[in-house]
Amino acid sequence: MLSPLLSLLDARSRQVLDSLKNVHVEDQLSEFANLCKPSRIVVLGESKQDIHFIRGLAKVRHEETKLKIRGHTVHFDGYNDLARDVGSTKVLATPEIKLSKRINSIDRDKGLSEILGLLSGSMTGREMLVKFYCLGPTNSNFSLCAMQVSDSAYVMHSEDLLYRQGYEQFKKLNGSNQFFSFLHSTGELDGRNTTKNYGKRRIYVDLLANRVYSVNNQYAGNSVGLKKLALRLAISKANHEGWLAEHMLVAGVHPPGKERVTYFVGAYPSACGKTSTAMIPGNTIVGDDIAYLRIDRGKKCRAVNIEHGIFGIIQDVNAQDDPLIYKALTTPRELIFSNVLVSDRTPYWLGMGRDDIPERGFNFSGNWRKGKRDNDDAEVPYAHPNARYTMRLSELDNVDPKYDDGKGVVVTGVLYGGRDSDTNPPISEALDWDHGVYLGATLESETTAAIIGKTGIRRHDPMANIDFVVIPLGKYLENHFKFGHRLKNKPRVFATNYFLKREGKYTNSKLDKKVWILWAEGRIHGDYDAIRTPLGYLPKYEDLKGLFHEIFNKEYSKDEYDFEFNVRISKYLEKIGRMETAFEGENYIPEKFWKVLRNQKKELIQIGQSAGVDSLSPDFFSRKE
Ligand code: SPV
Ligand code: MN
């Protein structure tokens, strides 16, 4: 072991590191120590004691504060560090690295010199914490080793809640360098323990070294390496190895009265209903954010959740709309709230369904009282719209029995969920796999608070993965086309839109999505006929009416159906126009994609002309059958 490293380790850390027998780990830690100049390095294994140590450290250092309910703590990221910073996240580029046009990049030498400069001495007087994790279940074909190095106990605590311990898995590398590594520093802190120099927040992804550097931030989407930083590295790795790394939920759907479970994966841009789809009452959850997909020997599609926790948006979680999460948030368990309002050691968030929100307390802006204004004279809400909670999946009553199964679950349904108020119906089924890839590739979402920038603008987000696709977009789509064609039984693909509006109001309640997903599940098993339209297969009125009645004892009127499932020709053609512009700007877009687009466009134009109207009820198409 190198001597500068040795002098910073206590006996226990030294022993933990020695037992790994991995010279690459040691070299990297020496490098990071020389760079960040910590006063001490704590290397942790995966014992209960090690996990307990981190949890305690976060409190001792006041990175987290205890709340009233046992096990609950709160963390504040800082006034200007409350969402993923896509603009400051860049791939270190060399001439041989080809990227999607939407990924920011910086010349590798220039970027390295900048970020190493920012990290230089960043841990002076502080501890460097080191832990080993596994992306995906351990001892599995899916397992990927990842090392997190950070000076933030909150980051380490989040990793412990969100990911599987991987110290023993690392030993199985037999000294190889086949692991991801993440170096993070909060940078200089102010009196509230929040990052001072957030203007110099940088997240630089080194695909050549399987490494990501992150500095001057704390928001988990920027700081927690195994989350979105690892997703970027995994997409590049998967591209070389023939599998898929996706921004997807994994859930088991259990139709009432039937003895079967059907597993779906689903890609939804941030705040488009991903967690709540995974958490639909009656479903079992495998994962709510990131999945790896592989083809097994029987040519079936298998998926694992690479996490074992949830970092969920808390806004609008209330007893009525999200009963399972609400219960978990209001009963004792190990759980971190971030960027909520705290008053009398109790957390409050937007849309929590209480009418006794205090008029003062502590929130992301510091001391808060009703009417407080920020520097731009805008009123500061009592909690941030991107406030979150972090907890283990095993805390939930509805966790799927296979959530930690190393073989993964067999996937027979894929969901792509966009967010628009005026174009897509609540649910439709792709005509075939290629059309399904097209539905994923053309996902759009009105932007939300999860990403820095203006909210409410329509954003094109292929497979909800565009921020992370560090390969050419065309290559990424080609991988999706190929993946499906290698499968024996291709999963059915569906598109959802939970955000359709009529006269400014959402046409559905949050829980209605259960009906759409049960319809999709029934389609996979041949329970329902459907109506073929140029957009895909649409449900028949009677089937939805029956499901609404059975599930909610609710009347679903023909008028609601006609409005929701109308084929809005000019709206669709506008969307196709936006897609033509978006994809013409990218390289290597597969011909298969253009073929689907052209067919759909031609069909829509022809039908519009022959019918002489702009909006067609599904009845029009069923009459044609
Ligand atoms: C998302 O924004 O997609 C999230 C939260 O899942 S973050 O960790 O910020 O990526
Ligand atoms: Mn996500």
Image (spheres, rainbow, N blue to C red):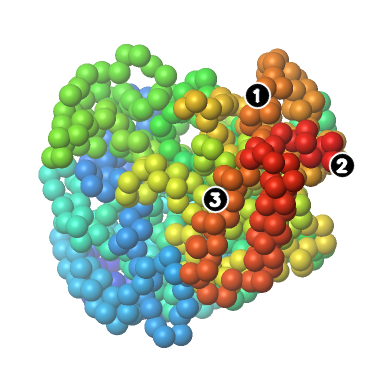
Q: CA distance from mark 3 to mark 1?
A: 24 Å
Q: CA distance from mark 2 to mark 3?
A: 27 Å
Q: Is mark 2 within 8 Å of ligand 2?
A: no
**Is the residue 377 above or below the residue 171 in the image?**
above
Q: Quadrant of the C terminus?
A: top right
Q: Amino acid at mark 3?
A: Glu
Q: Is residue 38 left or right of residue 146?
A: left
Q: Which residue is mark 3?
A: 574
Q: CA distance from mark 1 to mark 2?
A: 23 Å
Badge 3: residue crowd in 10 Å (few <14, some 14–19, many ≥20): few
Badge 2: residue crowd in 10 Å (few <14, some 14–19, many ≥20): few
Residue at x 58%, y 55% (from the top left corner)? 576
Q: Quadrant of the N terminus?
A: bottom left
Residue 347 at what x, y percent from top left? 33, 26
Mark on residue 28? Answer: none
Q: Which residue is mark 1?
A: 560
Q: Amino acid at mark 1?
A: Glu
Residue 570 at what x, y percent from top left? 59, 45
Q: Which residue is mark 2?
A: 625
**Is the residue 259 above or below the residue 155 in the image?**
above
